[in-house]
Image (spheres, rainbow, N blue to C red):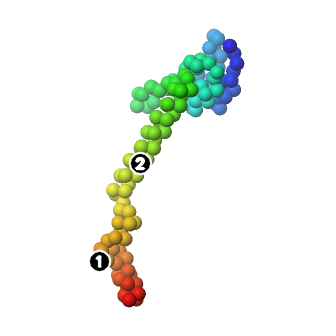
Amino acid sequence: MECKLCIDACPTNALYWDSGEVKVSEELCVFCTACVLSCIVDDCIQVRRRRANGEVEEFSTPREALLLQHRINTEKRTGRVESRKVHEREVPSLHRIRSLPPFLSRYGTESQERVKEAD
């Protein structure tokens, strides 16, 4: 069946027909999953890539594509959270700075003067 829904869905024209099968040009493919999500036949398109770390990712059904996207997005979110945790350890929070005693705070003398004026 040559319906070409997947070929039309590809934003980079990475798909093409060859010997009655849909093939993927790995150089052009950006792994957006549009082809697999638009295809009406499971396992018709085999998308595969090897990451720089040697890990191979592949999908050929909408379920596999969505699970892969979910895993990648989860890894990105986890990385951002870990990065934020490291940053928070290196840079004290504003709340922590405000809770310092006046003699340790950069703004201690100014704060003490405001308290005296309020009394």
Rounded to the nearest angstrom, the CA distance separating label 2 from label 1 is 33 Å
Please, what is the three-letter code of the amino acid marked with disc 1? Phe
| Residue 28 can be seen, yes or no | no
Numbered disc 2: secondary structure: helix
Q: Nearer the viewer, residue 36 or 29?
A: 36
At 47% across and 27% down in the image, what residue appears? Answer: 57
Residue at 33 percent across and 74 percent down: it is 105
The residue that mark 1 highlights is 103
Q: Quadrant of residue 45?
A: top right
Please name whichever residue, 99 or 6, is drawn nearer the observer in this view of the structure: 99
The picture quadrant where one finds residue 25 is top right
Query: Residue at left 50%, top 31%?
Result: 67
Tell me: residue 71, above or below residue 2: below
Residue 111 placement (x, y as % from top left): 38, 80
All told, the count of numbered labels is 2
**Which secondary structure lies at badge 1?**
loop
Image position, residue 21 (x, y; %): 62, 14
- Dot 2 alpha-carbon crowd within 10 angstroms: few under 14, some 14 to 19, many 20 or more: few
Asked if residue 56 can be seen in this view, the reply is yes
Residue linked to disc 2:
81
Image height check: is 107 above or below 13?
below
Answer with mark 2 or mark 1, whichever residue precedes in sequence. Answer: 2
Give the residue type at disc 2: Val
Q: Where residue 74 sits in the image (x, y, percent)? A: 45, 39
